[in-house]
Image (cartoon, helix red, strand yellow):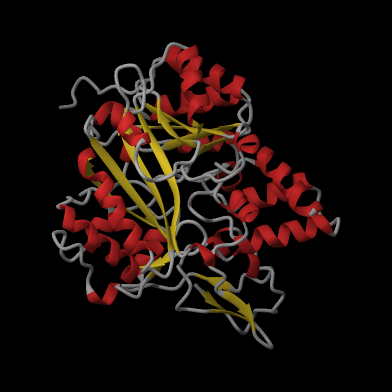
Amino acid sequence: MTHTAHRSGELESLQNDFVFLMMSAKGFNDKEATPKFKKFLEIAKECEAISVVDASKGHEKLQGSFEKMLENVHDRSVVHAVFDQREKVVEMLELLKKEGLGLSVVISGLLDTVHECCQEVGLKRHTVLLSSGIWGKTEKLPAKEVLDLHTMCGHGMVSAGLIEDIVEKVKEGLYSPEEGAEKLYEPCTCGIFNTSRAVEIIKKLSEA
Amino acid sequence: MYINEETCTACGECIPYCTVAAISLNEETAEIDYDECVECSICVRLNICPTNSITRDNLVWPRTVRNAMSDVLAMHKITGLGGRGTEEMKTNDVTGRYKEGFVGVAIEFGRPALGARFYDIEKITKASTEFGVEFEGDNPISALMSNKVTGEFPEELLNEKILTGIVEFIIEEKHLNDYLEVLKTVSQKIDSVFSLGLMVKCDDYGRIPDSISELDVDFYLNGKTCVGLGRKNKEAK
């Protein structure tokens, strides 16, 4: 369940990459959590998150519509919202604090930036997960830029092969970078793949 | 996963989608390398095949483990969650699982891009037991161990390949540097990769303990932050 950790990339690129998660704790606050998840998803939409998802059932395309996603939410849902702007992170945090849903909220992103965002809305970070990157036979890994896209789906559903295929098609003019990013989003069942950031990486790769 | 050779037109559309590059074309049809396939189901879920020639197999133990650990929407009986591990640090503001002076360790095997086999996972779990660690109980990888004290898995599981799986435990902060040294050594003996996450509770001012930044490992600038909005229900213990 560390699927939003370990997102690799350059500092400039990571400045536009934030993933909210909210979940209940088994045995502590999972009873009657359903309306709280619905509220989170509605707030995220209001804050113009670029992806709003209940990861337990899959992203909007897999569920059919946002309304169906709301219908399918349950007490053990794990909901996400992806943002590509710092100010939206602050806005979302403020609304979540005001709403007082009482479920755990985690933000993946640049640690110092998220720390500042918390301070701006009067929150004190509680726990952090630090990534020490990749260990082992790293020589078997795909190219760095491919990994920057691949690691945006922590479950590994966006394959290196698909990334290379899409970049080739963008090079050939068959897809725009935006269309390419949408294609890469589809296998990311949890919907945490940041299409906005992906567009910029695809542009770089296809121009290389 | 299984490709129906009678209906497959060898168009190759499915090939790039495979998370472990297990699909290839022979002269007349696409075929799946059964030993490499991790049963993640993505080739079926996305309806990529124009002739619906890819279907799920009826899996039997130990191959069932591949699907349970690789298919994002597969629900684990142990945790009641999709995914490959536990709630880890995400609900620490409610559960208090990670306390000051202790560090949560999450070793995510196969990630990124390569997948992992249990014989490699076992090399690390066995080495970890030298530090007397107790593997997280509510975790699918721990549940698969045949011996949680020695970190061993059942023999029939060792060659099974999964997309990712997380080994989780808590270690005293004072032992962490020594543990990381062992991890560095053993990581050279595996045929895949893992991503390492360390989970720490912040101090009363929201700061990360100095002892963590002084460790002899590099950290990404990004990570995950539990912002402290969670609370227990009144009826919870």
Quarter of the picture holding the N terminus of chain A: top left
Residue B222 seen from this side: yes
Residue A150 falls left or right of residue B172:
right
Residue A159: name its quadrant.
Answer: bottom right
Residue B198: name its quadrant.
Answer: top left
Percent across and percent down for residue B82 are 39, 49
Percent across and percent down for residue B49 are 65, 68
Residue A30 seen from this side: no
Q: Residue at x 40, y 39 (%)?
A: A130
Residue with the most extreme bottom position: B27
Q: Residue at x 42, y 30 (%)?
A: B225
* Above or below: residue A50 compared with residue A90: below
Q: Residue at x 57, y 64 (%)?
A: B43
Q: Nearer the viewer, residue B121 or A174?
A: B121
Residue B13 falls left or right of residue B119:
right
Residue A197: name its quadrant.
Answer: top right
